Image (tube, rainbow, N blue to C red):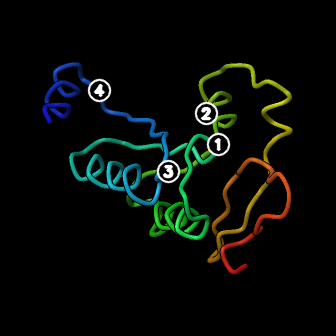
Amino acid sequence: TDLDLILKQKNVKNLILTGITTDVCVGTTMREANDLGYECLLLSDCTAATDYGNYMATLKTMQQAGGVFGCVAAAADLLKAIGEKVPAALEASLSDVDLGDGLRVKMPKPQGRMPTSLAE
């Protein structure tokens, strides 16, 4: 598509990624955007995938090697960074999940029994 051209004409340098199939569409878009020179932020609580293990592995991959493809954060963290108020309900809905190798991510608290780490 001509999205890269349009973004460059508008002097866009930073992208916030959300969406479903994080392990396919969102992750691929983030890697390609990084290759094109964009600074990327993937919102962990605004993305999803049909397979939890693949989803968590993608979040981990995006953060490895010092975040070579970009950064991963929760929407609440983004709101704080831009000086916006974070609704208490949003903050309360997040839990810290261990991805392994010293990497962590804030995710919505699961409804029912969900794995709490990639190893589960």
Of the image marks 4 and 3, the number of the one nearer the N terminus = 4
Q: Which residue is under mark 3?
A: 71
Q: Residues within 10 Å of mark 3 (few under 14, many from 20)?
A: some
Residue 55 lies, in percent from the top left, at 55, 62
Q: Residue at x 71, y 51 (%)?
A: 106
Q: Residues within 10 Å of mark 4 (few under 14, many from 20)?
A: few
Quadrant of the drawing holding the C terminus: bottom right
**How far apart are the two marked residues, 4 and 3, measured between alpha carbons?**
17 Å
Of the image marks 3 and 2, the number of the one nearer the N terminus = 3
When asked about the image quadrant of residue 5, the answer is top left
Q: Residue at x 48, y 41 (%)?
A: 19
**Label 2: which secondary element:** helix
Q: What kind of residue is marked 2?
A: Leu
Q: What kind of residue is marked 3?
A: Cys
Q: Which residue is under mark 4?
A: 12
Q: What kind of residue is marked 1?
A: Ala
Does the CB distance between marks 4 and 3 fall below 8 Å? no
Residue 10 lies, in percent from the top left, at 23, 19
**Label 1: which secondary element:** loop
**How far apart are the two marked residues, 4 and 2, measured between alpha carbons?**
17 Å
Q: Which labelled disc corresponds to residue 74? A: 1
**How far apart are the two marked residues, 4 and 1, measured between alpha carbons?**
21 Å
Does the CB distance between marks 1 and 2 fall below 8 Å? yes
**How far apart are the two marked residues, 3 and 1, measured between alpha carbons?**
10 Å
**Label 3: which secondary element:** strand
Quadrant of the drawing holding the N terminus: top left
Q: Nearer the viewer, residue 99 or 81?
A: 99
Q: Which residue is under mark 2?
A: 78
